[in-house]
Image: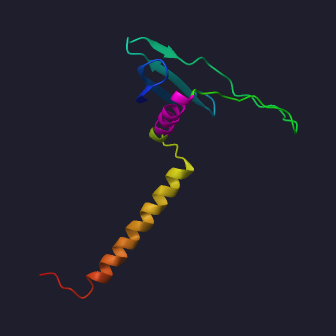
């Protein structure tokens, strides 16, 4: 479970996200809730992500609307919780690749700099 403190239009509170593998399904269950300063919890109501055919030029209402105050913190919380479950984003993979390349480069540079020097 990931927790993040934020301020979403109605005062400070904790936003919490939990991701679990659905039993007997190839799906993830995501639960989102907030705890207000008075200790009362509010949980997001279940929603089903459905897809329909889209006609060119047809106006599309948002699939999900998140308040501007909450968007960054909610997406951070979801990304962090997915990472905790071993689900990585493309950005995570790119960062890991860059760090690995930098480590190899530094090792190469060290071998060049210290080449010929004997340990005493």
Q: Nearer the viewer, residue 24 or 85?
A: 85
Q: Is residue 57 above or below residue 89?
A: above
- Where does the image place residue 86, in percent across and percent down from the top left? 48, 43
Q: Nearer the viewer, residue 3 or 1?
A: 3
- Residue 79 visible, this orientation: yes
Q: Nearer the viewer, residue 103 or 39?
A: 39
Residue located at (69% from left, 28% from top): 49
Residue located at (24% from left, 88% from top): 116
- Where does the image place residue 115, in percent across and percent down from the top left? 27, 85
Q: How many marks?
A: 0
Q: Is residue 45 above or below residue 96?
A: above
Residue located at (55% from left, 27% from top): 30
- The residue sitting at the front extreme is 9
Stretch of the chain drawn in magenta: 68-82
Specify the quadrant that holds the N terminus: top left
- The residue sitting at the bottom extreme is 116
From the viewer's perspective, is 108 left or right of 49? left
Residue located at (34% from left, 73% from top): 107
Specify the quadrant that holds the C terminus: bottom left
- Residue 21 visible, this orientation: no
Does 78 appear in magenta? yes
From the viewer's perspective, is 120 left or right of 107? left
- Where does the image place residue 74, in percent across and percent down from the top left? 51, 31
The secondary structure that dominates the magenta segment is: helix
Does 62 appear in magenta? no
Q: Nearer the viewer, residue 74 or 30?
A: 74
Image quadrant where residue 53 sits: top right
């Amino acid at each position: 479970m990931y927790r993040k403190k934020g301020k979403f239009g109605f005062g400070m509170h904790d936003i919490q996200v939990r991701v679990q593998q659905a039993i007997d399904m190839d799906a993830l269950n995501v639960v989102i809730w907030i705890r207000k300063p008075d200790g009362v919890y509010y949980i997001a109501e279940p929603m089903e992500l459905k897809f329909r055919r889209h006609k060119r030029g047809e106006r599309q209402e948002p699939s999900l609307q998140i308040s501007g105050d909450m968007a960054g913190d909610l997406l951070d919380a979801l990304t962090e919780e997915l990472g905790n479950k071993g689900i990585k984003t493309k950005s995570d993979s790119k960062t890991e690749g860059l760090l690995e390349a930098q480590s190899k480069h530094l090792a190469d540079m060290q071998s060049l700099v210290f080449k010929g020097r004997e340990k005493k």
